[in-house]
Amino acid sequence: MAPSHASFSSSIHQHLIERYRAVRDLTVRLCDPLSVEDMTVQVQPCASPTKWHLAHTTWFYETFILCEHENNFAPYSEGFCELFNSYYQGIGPQHPRAWRGVLTRPGLGEVMAYRDVVDDRITALLGSRLSERVLEHIRELLMLGLNHEQQHQELLLTDIKLLFNTNPLKPAYRDDLESADAAAPAPCDHGWRQFDGGIVEMGHAGEGFAYDNEGPRHRRFLEPFEIAQRPVSNAEYLAFVNDGGYRRHELWLYAGWTWVNEGHAHPIYWCKSAAGEWQEFTLGGMRPLDLSAPVSHVNFFEADAYARWAEARLPTEVEWEHAASTMPVRGNFVESGRLHPGTAANDDGDTGSFFGSAWEWTRSAHEPYPGYSPPAGAIGEYNGKFMCGSFVLRGGSCLTSESHIRLTYRNFFDPAAQWQCTGLRLARSLR
């Protein structure tokens, strides 16, 4: 006997509400260790205040779901549309990104009230009588909104880390985070895996949620190559630093060498103690550098220069995806509670994981796949207009939700970006 429309609608409603509440609640829990002052400050244009993340993610549901589908819709506040619109030209004007930190009003209390009101209205909408067609459309928008919020959860943590690192007190986001043994030996072998090459398929196959830039699925030709089974460790990157890697122009791309000469000599969160020992700033405060952990917070220029120094290169994204396609999507994600790359091996001692700890730079520009076209309307601005001047990263990090990552996920950042939890894995051509 086929399920009735009522039971179909109720089942979808319950699933969506549970998923919605879980994601929304996690965002608020991530703010628990923060003061009101912590959540208001913006230290660099690339990093938004926590309060803005809380409001912007709420604005997304209000703008793209409630505005279209709620009867007698009225915005929570007319001014919020401009304040919390990130970059959607099709929606209207935006408050300048570099000036988000001056928004002392609305206060945190009003932003939290905004979240509560929108959450109640989304819940009520999902509980109303909707046709299957409308409910499916709302479900698609809601899944996009939830994945969007998970992106902002990671940004919230990386933005706070950048903020706290500028404070001479070097405060910890959480004092109870696990501390690694800095004397732990670094892995000594990359464990190269070889691939014959040939025609392979890549991209999202159409089942489950994916962003538009992950498809369509298509074919690519691969030359024979090999790829390391584990990411580059802090110990290995420290050898590059000690070998004068930041002083050797021949290792750097032209734009990278220009960046180095702005005063860079090591990863952004590394520094030496008064005793001359390397330390690293973490969300748990300043810690001795864990030599066995994957290097993190290196930008594309640094990753590319290291690979050249190591007589290797960065993998292309098709090489990365092809190599990772037989691997389980498991690793050190935000659910582990570590909030920092662990070791270059996963919990089982398996160095074969391609997921978690740190996003991995590829040599591939963020460009459209063959046959790609952005969705219609303002939603089409989500990825398509950013396919210029950035490089693709794969695999997720220790600040990524496990339910957010998948094999085909294409993250992307400007090549000079350091504040994200980004690392690298080496590859080599076999011809």
Image: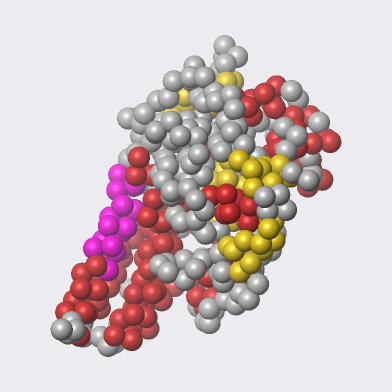
Q: Quadrant of residue 19?
A: bottom left
Give the camera-side residue of 97 and 398. Answer: 398
Position above or below: 129 against 335:
below
x then y, percent, for residue 264 = 70, 34
Residue found farthest to the right: 250
Give the camera-side residue of 113 and 213. Answer: 213
Name the residue: 36% across, 31% down: 177
Q: Quadrant of residue 266?
A: top right
137 falls in the magenta region: no
Name the residue: 63% across, 67% down: 219
Image quadrant containing the N terminus? bottom left
Res. 191 in view: yes
x then y, percent, for residue 366 = 65, 60
Q: Quadrant of residue 398?
A: top left
Q: Main secondary structure of the magenta part?
A: helix
Give the camera-side residue of 331 and 361. Answer: 331
Name the residue: 56% across, 69% down: 217
Q: Which residues are magenta?
A: 16-32
x then y, percent, for residue 88 = 53, 72
Give the camera-side residue of 92 and 265. Answer: 265
Position above or below: 177 against 412:
above
x then y, percent, for residue 97 = 55, 60
Position above or below: 207 against 316:
below
Name the residue: 38% across, 44% down: 334
Report the number of numbered marks. 0
Position above or below: 63 against 179:
below
